[in-house]
Amino acid sequence: MNRTEFVIATAIILLVAFAMGWFTHWLLHRFTRVAGGDMAEMDRLAQSLHEAEELRDQALIYLEQREGELMNHIAQTEAELRAAMEGLRDARHEAEEMRSYIERMHANS
């Protein structure tokens, strides 16, 4: 192989390598390209997602507050129920004592 053939072979190899690199770059650019309209759409979707996450966080906070209020209300209602039941029990016991007292008074008369 003389000098001219070596230069031509090297030039052809370099040309083929350049063509393959350029073609690969073109393919990658073609498949991964994001158009300006697509980017605007992606920005809009990202903003919508951010707003939805904020709304979800606010809803969770409201739900936790409301649940706390309701649990407090339930505890108060149960305490009132226990007090009412105790008062009713005392009233029944007192009524029973009064009945027995009245029966004893009628029996002694």
Image: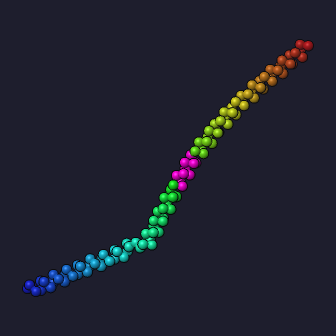
Name the quadrant containing residue 40. Answer: bottom left
Is 56 in the magenta?
yes
| Image x and y of residue 18, in percent | 23, 79
Quadrant, the N terminus: bottom left
The image shows residue 89, relative to residue 50, as above or below, that is above
Is 67 in the magenta?
no
| Image x and y of residue 41, in percent | 47, 69
Name of the residue lying farthest toward the left:
2
The image shows residue 84, relative to residue 11, as above or below, that is above
- 13 sits to left or right of 92: left
- 54 sits to left or right of 89: left
Question: Residue sitting at 83 percent across and 17 percent down?
Answer: 101
Name of the residue lying farthest toward the right:
109
- 104 sits to left or right of 40: right
Name of the residue lying farthest toward the top:
108
Question: Residue sitting at 48 percent across and 62 percent down?
Answer: 47
| Image x and y of residue 75, in percent | 63, 36
Q: In the rendered picture of this protein, how many numbered marks are placed on residues?
A: 0
Question: Residue sitting at 57 percent across and 48 percent down?
Answer: 62
Question: Which residues, given as a range, are shown in magenta?
Answer: 55-64
Chosen colour scheme: rainbow
The image shows residue 18, relative to residue 82, as above or below, that is below
| Image x and y of residue 56, in percent | 53, 54
Return the residue nearer the eye: 60 or 47.
Answer: 47
Quadrant, the C terminus: top right
Question: Residue sitting at 42 percent across and 72 percent down?
Answer: 36
Return the residue nearer the eye: 86 or 56.
Answer: 56
> What secondary structure prevails in the magenta region?
helix
